[in-house]
Amino acid sequence: MVKLIATSLLGMLISIGSAKATPWDELTSTQLEQKLTEKFSEGKYSAKGADSCLMCHKKSTKVMAIFDGVHGDLSNSKSPMAGIQCEACHGPLGNHNRGGKEPMISFSASSKLSAASQNTVCQGCHNDPKQIAWHNSTHNLEEIACADCHNVHVAKDPTLDRLTVNTTCTSCHTRVKADMNKRSSHPMKWDQMTCIDCHSPHGSMTESALIKPSLNETCAECHADKRGPFLWEHAPVMEDCSSCHSPHGSVNDNLLKSRAPQLCQQCHADDGHASRVSSEAGLDAFSAGKSCLNCHSKIHGSNHPAGSNFAR
């Protein structure tokens, strides 16, 4: 009798466990993608739209939060909820609600669906010029999914909020986060400046996904006084601001890669004047105050007729 009861309990536990497990958990990524492709080709969408989905999912606060944001706005003709609703993003319902035997598209880090496949759903609507360089972008090449940064089931996507976008970026770019908290940095740690002021997360035609064709042009958006052209130009300044500056932050003043005179002497080290080394800091004009900049104050360029040495 005891053996019979134990066997019955074991059978109940097995049946409960199998009821909680989704049948498509056993599918490989390739098999899952193939099954979803078949579902799209069949096109068996629900006649009741979101009502069919909410019969099971309405208890989830995360699911219901879709109605707080733009994607769940029924009055907006561009919103998925104004069209075929949940199935616009998660795919045709098919027989999913009949015993849960058919998979749906899921967007999360735990999704077996590849990032590229997940992203094609988003790009079905979001295909404006801002995403024109996405396929060449580092984020795409590193297989980052849109859902890794963006959150649709919220009233306001944190990635689209200037006060929280830096947190989103630095959750992966930890080295930049360390730099922006150094003693000399752009005001990013106070959210007065954001990563997307300089970079385009969806890619661009320039290195480091800059919003402008070059680093100098990007910097000049704010530092217009350094743009030039100047009568007397300082070559490294015109070539690349990062020759001297570390844009995300530095332990030195003005985001400099190293202090003067060491920074200057990386190039100016072949004559007696420029290559002079002070035995002790603060003893003379070569080490006191701003070092080389005590005399050469117009280091970014000069328009003075006698400014060939950037002293005026």
Image (cartoon, helix red, strand yellow):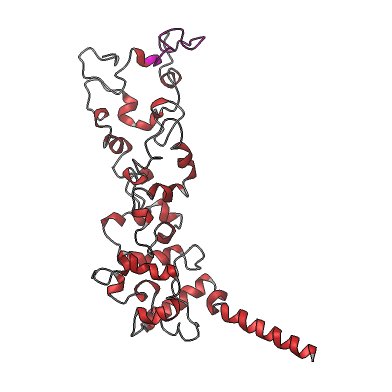
Q: Based on the displayed image, in which of its 4 quarters is residue 76 positioned? A: bottom left
Residue plotted at (46% across, 42% down)? 177
Q: Is residue 155 left or right of residue 111?
A: left
Residue 53 x %, y %: 40, 79
Q: Is residue 136 left or right of residue 17?
A: left
Quadrant containing the C terminus in the rendered view? top left
In-front residue for pair 293/163: 163
Vertical comparison of 66 with 183: above or below: below
Residue 28 x %, y %: 54, 72
In-front residue for pair 187/200: 187
Residue plotted at (42% across, 66% down)? 118
In-front residue for pair 83/293: 83
Vertical comparison of 49 with 163: above or below: below
Magenta region, mostly helix, strand or loop? loop
**Number of numbered discs on residues:** 0
Residue plotted at (71% across, 88% down)? 8
Q: Based on the displayed image, in which of its 4 quarters is residue 153 positioned? A: bottom left
Q: Based on the displayed image, in which of its 4 quarters is residue 107 positioned? A: bottom left
Q: Is residue 252 left or right of residue 198?
A: right
Residue 106 x %, y %: 45, 70
User: What's drawn in magenta, residue-wise?
Assistant: 273-292
Residue 277 x %, y %: 48, 11
Residue plotted at (21% across, 16% down)? 304
Indicate whether residue 15 is drawn in magenta.
no
Vertical comparison of 119 with 272: above or below: below
Quadrant containing the N terminus in the rendered view? bottom right
